[in-house]
Image (cartoon, rainbow, N blue to C red):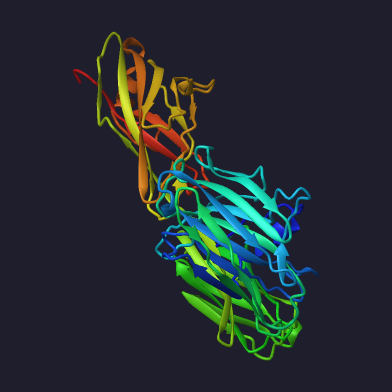
């Protein structure tokens, strides 16, 4: 599960959501009397990170209670979910950032479960205050909001409206992460309990689950693993690099561990894995591929509490959607984080729709020539087409009257086909291109011909075609811009021969 970073003005929320991006050392859940897919569930989450929480000197944000509300609660409709719960003074209390009590620390998040082993997609999130609201990212309509909230350290009352009508997906759900302040967590293992009362306005039943979150001993092995993309100038198009960082959050020095980088989705291969352990009494350890998985061992290295191990991972063959798991394993525990890299590849093809155009030897008249441009995304990653520039060749005796198109994005209207001073046309044809899909645009150029102004040599050159020779045929040069969606910049030429009738 991934939570984007939050503004520094909300330290509890920032720390909580960063912690949730990494593996949790301990989490226990007791569901309401139905499966997690069809009914509300509650889970306790304790996040371990050094002497304090998340590297800080206090215990705020270590413990949270998550209420998951699936779409099956209100299919294609809305309902209110009310949560009433006491804290456990002496162990934990509610974290209430606002003096007025109209906010509880935490987040409301809307997800769609993609299935197939894919991580859920975070569509929107917000805080949990009286003015907090979630919006449909596509239509900008409300999909969730806090209807009422009263927060004191001793008691929380929260009513949240979920709306599965404006953004319906049977695999969607809301997560309400409710934050607490932990009193003197200490160095030993301990458990925390949570017994809320949950009422759904469209149901008669009241849920009263009891859940537990387990805090491990500070001496128990725990590491926080994170990944960060590294940009490499001049690297091959199918190459990628990221830095893996593993921090020892245990009071016990970290030793006898392994670090690995392995593909869990896509075509990417791990080209190299290198970790510098010299600061901890070890060596620079490395493994080379290409391989689906590479592993290095710690050797004599011992990493103290709060210190970071840094590794570099190089990838090759990055095409389509790719996910690589960077992991540290010690004993029977593994701590990991996923690095994702999408690289769509869009191919461009151009073809004439007319194989031959006939023109009368005398008089003034019009001729039309047509051609297509196709953008094809053959990968499983979403990509995009790109903008184009049409540069028609105008032979002597010919005048370009107009260019029209079909199959273009909706924002390419009649005014888009205005000729520039140099005779070219710039078209904003860039648009999203789904995985394994293509789009074809067809253009028609209309020329006015003054046959008496066409010389004999020009007629001869018009009758043959060589796209590389712009003096022959009716040639259209198409300049394709590059796009971040996988289209490479390039130039294509289309040539259509024109034959004089009677020859």
Query: Is residue 234 something one can see in this rendering?
Result: no
The one nearer the camera, 294 or 239, is 294
Q: In front here: 272 or 490?
A: 272
Looking at the picture, does residue 76 appear above or below residue 269? above
Farthest-out residue, bottom? 300
Which residue lies most toward the right here? 57
In this rendering, is residue 215 above or below 115? Answer: below
Assign the N terminus to one quadrant of the image: bottom right
Number of marks present in the image shown? 0
Place of residue 366 in the rendered image (x, y in percent of width and height, measured from the top left): 31, 14
Indicate the quadrant where residue 56 lies.
Answer: bottom right
Residue 424, placed above or below residue 379: above
Which quarter of the figure is the C terminus placed in? top left
Q: Nearer the viewer, residue 282 or 402?
A: 282
Q: Is residue 89 left or right of residue 290?
A: right
Q: Residue 58 location, x and y as percent? A: 79, 69
Relative horizontal placement of residue 228, taking residue 407 as reference (left or right) = right
Left/right of residue 226 with respect to residue 279 in the rendered view:
left
337 is higher (above) or lower (below) than 425: below
């Amino acid at each position: 599960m991934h939570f984007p970073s939050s503004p520094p003005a909300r330290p509890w929320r920032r720390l909580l959501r960063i912690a949730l991006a990494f593996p949790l050392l301990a989490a226990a859940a007791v569901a309401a009397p139905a499966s997690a897919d069809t009914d509300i569930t509650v889970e306790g989450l304790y996040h371990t990170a050094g002497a304090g929480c998340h590297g800080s000197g206090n215990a705020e944000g270590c413990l949270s209670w998550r209420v998951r509300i699936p779409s099956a609660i209100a299919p294609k409709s809305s309902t209110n979910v009310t949560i009433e719960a006491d804290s456990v003074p002496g162990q934990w209390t509610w974290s209430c950032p606002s003096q007025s009590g109209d906010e509880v620390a935490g987040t409301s998040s809307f997800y769609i479960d993609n299935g197939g082993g894919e991580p859920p997609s975070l569509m929107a999130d917000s805080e949990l205050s009286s003015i907090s609201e979630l919006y449909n990212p596509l239509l900008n309509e409300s999909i969730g909001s806090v209807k009422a909230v009263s927060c004191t350290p001793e008691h929380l009352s929260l009513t949240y409206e979920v709306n599965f009508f404006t953004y319906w997906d049977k695999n969607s759900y809301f997560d309400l992460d409710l934050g607490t302040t932990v009193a003197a967590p200490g160095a030993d293992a301990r458990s925390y309990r949570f017994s809320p009362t949950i009422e759904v306005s469209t149901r008669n039943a009241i849920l009263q689950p009891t859940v537990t979150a387990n805090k491990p001993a500070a001496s128990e092995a725990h590491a926080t693993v994170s990944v960060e993309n590294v940009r490499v100038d001049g690297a091959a198009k199918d190459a990628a690099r990221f830095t893996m960082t593993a921090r020892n959050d245990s009071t016990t020095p970290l030793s006898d561990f392994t670090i690995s980088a392995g593909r869990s989705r896509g075509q990417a291969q791990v080209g190299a894995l290198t970790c510098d352990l010299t600061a901890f009494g070890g060596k620079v350890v490395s493994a080379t591929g290409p391989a689906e998985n590479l592993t290095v061992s710690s050797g004599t290295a011992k990493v103290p509490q709060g210190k970071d191990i840094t590794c570099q991972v190089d990838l090759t063959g990055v095409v389509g959607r790719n996910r690589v798991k960077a992991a540290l394993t010690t004993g029977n525990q593994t701590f990991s984080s996923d690095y994702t890299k999408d690289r769509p590849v869009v191919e461009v093809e151009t073809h004439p729709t007319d194989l031959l155009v006939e023109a009368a030897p005398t008089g003034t008249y019009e001729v039309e020539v047509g051609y297509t441009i196709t953008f094809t995304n053959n990968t499983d990653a979403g990509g995009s087409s790109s903008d184009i520039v049409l540069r028609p060749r105008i032979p002597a005796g010919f005048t370009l009257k107009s260019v029209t198109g079909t199959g273009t994005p909706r924002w390419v209207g009649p005014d888009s086909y205005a000729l520039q001073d140099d005779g070219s046309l710039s078209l904003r044809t860039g648009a999203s291109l789904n995985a394994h899909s293509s789009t074809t645009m067809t253009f028609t150029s209309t020329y006015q011909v003054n046959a008496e102004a066409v010389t004999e040599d020009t007629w001869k050159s018009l009758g043959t075609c060589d796209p590389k020779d712009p003096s022959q045929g009716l040639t259209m040069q198409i300049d394709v811009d590059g796009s971040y969606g996988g289209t490479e910049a390039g130039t294509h030429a289309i040539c259509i021969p024109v034959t004089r009738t009677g020859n």
